[in-house]
Amino acid sequence: MPVVRSWSFGFLTAVLSIGCSSEIERGPIMGSDVGTASRPRGSSDTATAGGATTGSIPANACETGASWGARGDFVLERSSPGDEFAETVTALIRRSDLPPVAVSSHMDPNCVWRVAFSAADGGESTGTRHPTTFTPMLRHPAGLWTAAPQSAGWLRIIDGSSRAVWIPVIEITGSATYGEASCASLSAVRASATIPSSAAGLSMMTAGGERTGRELMASEPSAHGWDVRFTFSADIAR
């Protein structure tokens, strides 16, 4: 997936440093509940899904950390005509009101913006069951994109038996365009990732019965796993 990189590093550094002071707004760092999208149907920098943040909405998400939950338009792109996995996962996601993934950003104490493409861990308050890494983020008034691959994240789906299935994703790169002037939404979110081969045995209830990831995939995994791409729009978590 092509990622815009036309802005010089020096300019981006200046943009990222604007407004950075001793009072750092870290924003929601993968809280224990990312929230439901308002329109559900229509580096080594490691962070776990702790530090819940629900309730208040940043006055301007362009200037502070935020978390945007995917709407129901999430699409996992098919890698081939016989790719049942993408079709099955997309269909399950569209049956649920729970965002399968979120885009979460914050500024760290070193004045560097970081981002993660991952579902928030609602399983426990410490978020240790599904830890997520953040990666440096390039930020422009029009949008954001990853400056380096994010090493680990998750997609969360609710299968046909109402069971949460957590699909690990690695080597994630992504970009998004800010919506309103206050960045209350994201449009044209695009991400590429790899589902590791270790997820081949993940089981989910589908319209055709219980199936594993390997059974649904149209091909054998590479040395790293299966490459996937997904698109969606998102609303700030409420």
Image: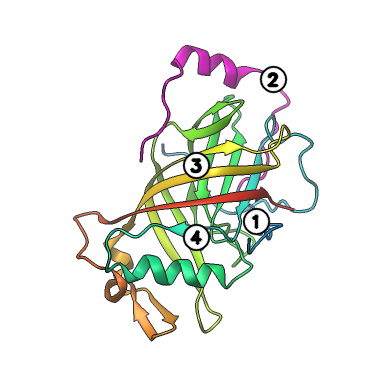
The residue lying at 59 percent from left, 24 percent from top is 111
Q: Quadrant of residue 222?
A: bottom left
- What is the C-alpha distance between the residues marked 4 and 2? 32 Å
Residue for badge 1: 34
Give the crowd class for mark 1: few <14, some 14-19, many >=20 residues within 10 Å. Answer: many
Residue 173 is situated, as x and y percent measured from the top left of the image, at: 41, 41
Q: Nearer the viewer, residue 235 or 152?
A: 235
The residue lying at 79 percent from left, 36 percent from top is 59
Of labels 2 and 1, earlier in sequence is: 2
Q: Nearer the viewer, residue 128 or 144?
A: 144
- What is the C-alpha distance between the residues marked 3 and 2? 21 Å
- What is the C-alpha distance between the residues marked 1 and 3? 16 Å
Q: Are marks 3 and 4 in contact (CB under 8 Å)?
A: no
Residue for badge 4: 130
Give the quadrant of the N terminus: top left
Report the disc number at residue 19. Answer: 2
Task: Give the residue type that dot 4 points to.
Answer: His
Residue 4 is situated, as x and y percent measured from the top left of the image, at: 43, 29
Of labels 1 and 3, earlier in sequence is: 1
Residue for badge 3: 134
Of labels 3 and 2, earlier in sequence is: 2
Task: Give the residue type that dot 1 points to.
Answer: Val
Give the crowd class for mark 2: few <14, some 14-19, many >=20 residues within 10 Å. Answer: few
- What is the C-alpha distance between the residues marked 2 and 1? 26 Å
- Magenta segment, which residues? 1-29
Q: Nearer the viewer, mark 1 or mark 3?
A: 1
